[in-house]
Image: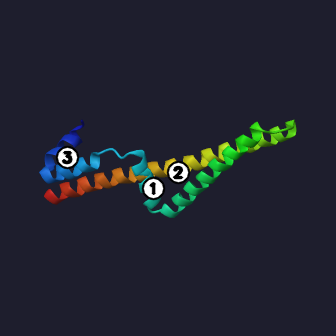
Amino acid sequence: MTEFDTRLRAALDADDEAFLRELDSERGLFAQIGDTLTGPLGGWAKLIFAVALALGIALFVAIWQMLTADTDRQLFIWVAVTLGLLMAQGFVKQWFFERMNLMTILRELKRVELRIARIEERA
């Protein structure tokens, strides 16, 4: 623990400690997904979630078609489609998880702002 953390904890009273302990609890994956879907860009996040779901379904269809292809030409086409869908799925999930990380960082910044505001109130 740094000197700043020590001074910060000393400045907080029992109510503040309880409130900050509540904030300190780790958020699970599903809670973070829920925060992302209801955040400032919740509409976009919902759209991306639907796109990821559609890409996942299309990916399973493409894999099935690849495994049941009759000719080498069909096999090549379905392998290319499968690879393209895998890449698209990766890009979509990357965007979604980066959004989740942004929401986590914003949450942490709000906690720091709250701590600083409470310290300034006492000074």
Q: Hey, what amino acid is under mark 3?
A: Leu
User: At x 59% / y 50%, what residue is drawn?
Assistant: 92
Left or right: residue 93 versus residue 73 is left
Looking at the image, is mark 3 or mark 1 earlier in the sequence? 3
Where, quadrant-wise, is the C terminus in this rendering?
Answer: bottom left
Q: Secondary structure at mark 1?
A: helix
Q: Hey, what amino acid is under mark 1?
A: Thr
Q: Which residue is mark 1?
A: 36
Picture layout, residue 83 above or below residue 43: above
Left or right: residue 56 versus residue 101 is right
Q: Quadrant of residue 62?
A: top right
User: Where residue 40 sits in the image (x, y, percent)?
Assistant: 45, 63
- Measure the C-alpha gap from mark 3 to mark 2: 34 Å
Where, quadrant-wise, is the N terminus in this rendering?
Answer: top left
User: Where residue 42 sits in the image (x, y, percent)?
Assistant: 48, 61
Instruction: Determine contact: label 3, label 2, CB under 8 Å.
Output: no
Q: How is the image coloured?
A: rainbow
User: Where residue 70 sits in the image (x, y, percent)?
Assistant: 84, 38
User: At x 41% / y 56%, what residue is drawn?
Assistant: 35
Looking at the image, is mark 2 or mark 1 earlier in the sequence? 1
User: Where residue 11 sits in the image (x, y, percent)?
Assistant: 15, 49
Q: Which residue is mark 3?
A: 8
Near-viewer residue (6 or 79):
79
Q: Secondary structure at mark 3?
A: helix
Mark 3 crowd level (few <14, some 14–19, many ≥20, 10 Å Cα) = some
- Residue 13 is at least partly visible in this image: no
Q: Which residue is mark 2?
A: 96
Near-viewer residue (66 or 49):
66
